[in-house]
Amino acid sequence: MNVSPNFSPKIELMKPYFFLSAGFYFLSMLWLFFMNPLSDFTDFTLIGWVHLYMIGFVMMAFFSAMSQLGPIVIESGHYNVQIFKYLWVLLTLGLVLLLIGFYKDITFLLYGGSFILMAMLIYAVEFLQTLRKSKRKTAITKAMSMSNISLIIGISTGLVMAMGFNNKLAINPEDFLKMHTFGLIVGFVILLIMGISLVLIPMFGFSKRISDNEFKSSFYTLTLGVIFMLLSPFFLPTIFENLSYFFTIIAISLFFYQLFKMTESRKRIVHDIWAKSMYVAYSSFLFAFIILITYLLSENSAMLRVGMWLLFIGFFGFVIMGNFYKIIPFLVWFHIYSPLIETQSVPMLHELLPNRLATLQWFFSLSGLVLTTIAIALLNQKLFIGGVLLLSSASLIFFIIIIKLLKLKI
């Protein structure tokens, strides 16, 4: 694979995405002070926070990261890179309107959902066109295609649910909830992380890549799981849901085996901030996976809360922050400093990241994750607030680091 960064957009074009992702992460951690994590899953206060975290932090991060990594992986430039000038505006406006809908007036869910659907459609269609013109056809590129199709379906069902809440469609919105969440969380986020992990872990972790055929086993199995869940509202709901869970469990188990093989093949071991973040991320993923399987067998809502918390804060959070610490310094160095090499002295790549600050952020994040997870398991509100204080401090440090890395004057 040719990893030339010439395929990726200029750093100036993507700065708003990195900045907003870190900013929304900080805001979502502060938001936890004003909500009850033990509230019912139908509570709009909790649902609003989930959308703030997933759209503001996770989706904005994926837009920024995939705009850079996607073309490098498929060895082809963007079909139309200019879309990234405006997508962050649509996404931010849609998120604000969604939050107004969840917290003030349910009518705004339609407006917010429409803007977000517009942004996601533009992103997904552009990415699919970029994949189409690439000569590189592998299991990873197929996973990218499937993840974008799942993104379109997942966001579309979210708008359908908003129309149901506003009595614009004669449906029960809860009938589409699993389709919406599974399509986005498993079909888009987890599938995309699985595919990109096969590139980033060997690249940053000095390990051997697994073969394309090996990844096909987990990719195709997970795709089956997603398809069964997306079809479940329309055909044999109970049977299709159970088949979806079965194939998803098999796929993620295969993926953990592939992770183990890559970890065992490391040529040299470096415990830098990226590696430490990946240790926490994939450990959280493993624990969340086990806990959520337990939930499926017991239907204990406490298990669902703990499992989803570990998945969101532990897995998604540490995967994104750890990879930001690798991706952003490289992009800044390549686009800003490399042209100056022959005219003036430039910093080394590793000198761009404030490592002590990043380590402090990692420690606070890990401590906050542990405390809040225990608090949710024990139904202890005071302990949860203590953990949130650590997470909020860590998120502020992360926000400051991203501002420093991007050389923003604020």
Image (spheres, rainbow, N blue to C red):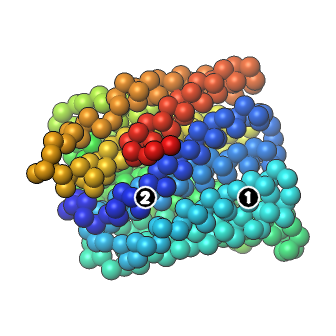
For the residue pair 6 and 342, the one nearer the viewer reads as: 342
Say if 289 sits above or below 164 in the image: above
Asked which quadrant contains residue 55, the reply is: bottom right
Q: On residue 284, which mark appears? A: none
Is 95 or 383 nearer to us in this picture?
Answer: 95
Q: Residue 342 vs residue 349: left or right?
A: left
Which element type, helix, strand or loop, lies under badge 1? Answer: helix
Q: Position of residue 133 (x, y in %)?
A: 33, 80
Measuring from the top left, give residue 115's x and y in whole percent: 66, 69
Distance CA(mark 2)–CA(mark 1): 24 Å
> For the point 41% across and 27% down, which residue is it?
357
Taking 196 as reference, is 334 left or right? left
The residue that mark 2 highlights is 14
Q: Kindly identify the amino acid type of the residue bearing the numbered disc 1.
A: Leu
Evaluate whether residue 28 shows in this view: yes
Q: Residues within 10 Å of mark 1 (few under 14, many from 20)?
A: many
Residue labelled with disc 1: 98
Residue 150 visible to the viewer: no
Q: Give the residue displayed 48% in from the left and 36% down from the top.
A: 400
Mark 2 or 1, nearer chain start: 2
Tag 2: residue type?
Answer: Met
